[in-house]
Amino acid sequence: MNRSELKQHILRKNSFLCVGLDPVLEKLPPALQKEKDPIFTFNKAIIDATIEHAVAYKPNMAFYEALGAKGWESLEKTMEYLPEEVFVIADAKRGDIGNTSGLYAKAFFETLQADAITVAPYMGQDSVSPFLSFPNKWVILLALTSNEGSKDFQLIKGADDKALYEQVIRKSLAWGHADNLMYVVGATRGDEIAKVRDLAPEHFFLVPGVGAQGGSLEEVVKYGINNDIGLLVNSSRGIIYASNGPDFAKAAGRAAKSLHQDMQMLLAHYYKG
Amino acid sequence: MNRSELKQHILRKNSFLCVGLDPVLEKLPPALQKEKDPIFTFNKAIIDATIEHAVAYKPNMAFYEALGAKGWESLEKTMEYLPEEVFVIADAKRGDIGNTSGLYAKAFFETLQADAITVAPYMGQDSVSPFLSFPNKWVILLALTSNEGSKDFQLIKGADDKALYEQVIRKSLAWGHADNLMYVVGATRGDEIAKVRDLAPEHFFLVPGVGAQGGSLEEVVKYGINNDIGLLVNSSRGIIYASNGPDFAKAAGRAAKSLHQDMQMLLAHYYKG
């Protein structure tokens, strides 16, 4: 999916919601446990219940790899089930030497047919570039994450008084462009988001940390929105575990609908496209 | 495997060789292509041919994930086939928010029974710590890698004139200890290795970049050796693709033997334990 298609898709649905598909076997509703493939059955129900509210889905690879080859099968079925029109992010946080990153790119873009993959920047350009050479596929580079440990290295200031995450953005802007590169921006304070938007005015941001991880959706939109909307805001646990009962899918749908309604209001107020 | 067992294992074999199991389907000898599971058949032959020379094996996950669920099966069979006495490194370069890193830890330490996993530091302490709480299991943290892109961020100097990779080592020393934490040190110049050894005198280093990626084994040993030897030196392509003919396993054995002999000489010369 290219940038203009993504923008149209967001405008059509009036939503920039990404649903994180992070199922843990033990946390699934008891009724699903006896299914042949509980993970896929769960994902299918969550997708059906949230599809009218979401523009993107983001399975985190860890949740599938934890189950070995069987987990990969559930993942492959989930990827196949996701409709053509949604933007699919393989949350893999990969990054390895060039030829190895190339293999990961093949795994996620070709075998799994994801539109985008999250990539860690530590190993530098030759670990990121192999992901950038697939037409209409995207790298979502970790810049500023929303976890506590983001302070350990991402905020370290270099000799030029720029934090590492700023240097990651500045340098990587030259590796790709707004049509194949997005950033993970876990900033939830307005001034932080405004700063990152200044650095990368045209790029899409994937924003975690709204919902279960806290953070204000309005601040994100007010300071992060651009001409293409430029935002995908993720919620995982707040949606997929909205209920643990037989009504889990309905509850997930309601949670997604509530975020969708907030997004509609914020778009009406802040989007001047 | 704990540190003392690893040291004894190295002394017994008189080798600190790690063999990288990075099979690419298209590169395998034609005779193997018609096997039911060519990747596992290849790995099995490589392991059999090199086991007397190697103390560790390091499958890189990308090579298996590129093949989807089938690749994971080949990986699982390979992990099962590796004998108890060898040190097994899942080269995964993972790193995600805490609960997700915990799932990766489970996947690699419990499902796949690896002794160690390579981890990327960008997301900080809470992304690394979940891997450190498994008894006799190891994190091998990326510090200084051997690829071209290592210069992009790892060598950026902070306000205190320390490069990022030095800050990664300094800070992470407090997260674990020499019994559960190693570092990837792709340094191949003596002065660089000596510097890293100063920072972490007791920790094991996993050293890529000897063999196909270039680099002097003698410099690594001269400046990197410690009381426990403290080194695992990896070779992947130089061994597993030593020949593409029907003699591939024999050729791999010869390449491993040659490195083993170099290591024996270097240990005799430099190890004062």
Image: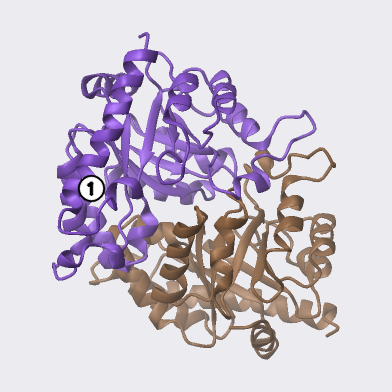
Chain colours: A brown, B purple
- Give the crowd class for mark 1: few <14, some 14-19, many >=20 residues within 10 Å: many
Q: Is residue A188 visible?
A: no
Q: Nearer the viewer, residue A269 or B211?
A: B211
Q: Position of residue A98 (x, y in %)?
A: 51, 57
Q: Is residue A201 left or right of residue B100?
A: right
Residue at horizontal 22 percent and vertical 24 percent from the top: B13
In the rendered view, tell whether residue A213 sits above or below residue A116.
above
Q: Is residue B43 visible?
A: yes
Q: Position of residue A185 (x, y in %)?
A: 69, 59
> Residue B204, located in which quarter of the rendered image?
top left
> What amino acid is found at the position of numbered circle 1 in the picture?
Met
Residue at horizontal 28 percent and vertical 23 percent from the top: B10
> Residue B124, located in which quarter of the rendered image?
top right
Say which element carries label 1. Answer: helix
In the rendered view, tell whether residue B103 sits above or below residue B178.
below
* Chain hosting mark 1: B
Which quadrant holds the C terminus of chain B? top left
Q: Is residue B213 left or right of residue B3?
A: right
Which residue was labeled with disc 1?
Answer: B79
> Residue B8, located in which quarter of the rendered image?
top left
Number of numbered discs on residues: 1
Which quadrant holds the N terminus of chain B? top left
Q: Is residue B272 left or right of residue A8?
A: left
In the rendered view, tell whether residue B197 sits above or below residue B244.
above
Q: Position of residue B197 (x, y in %)?
A: 53, 21
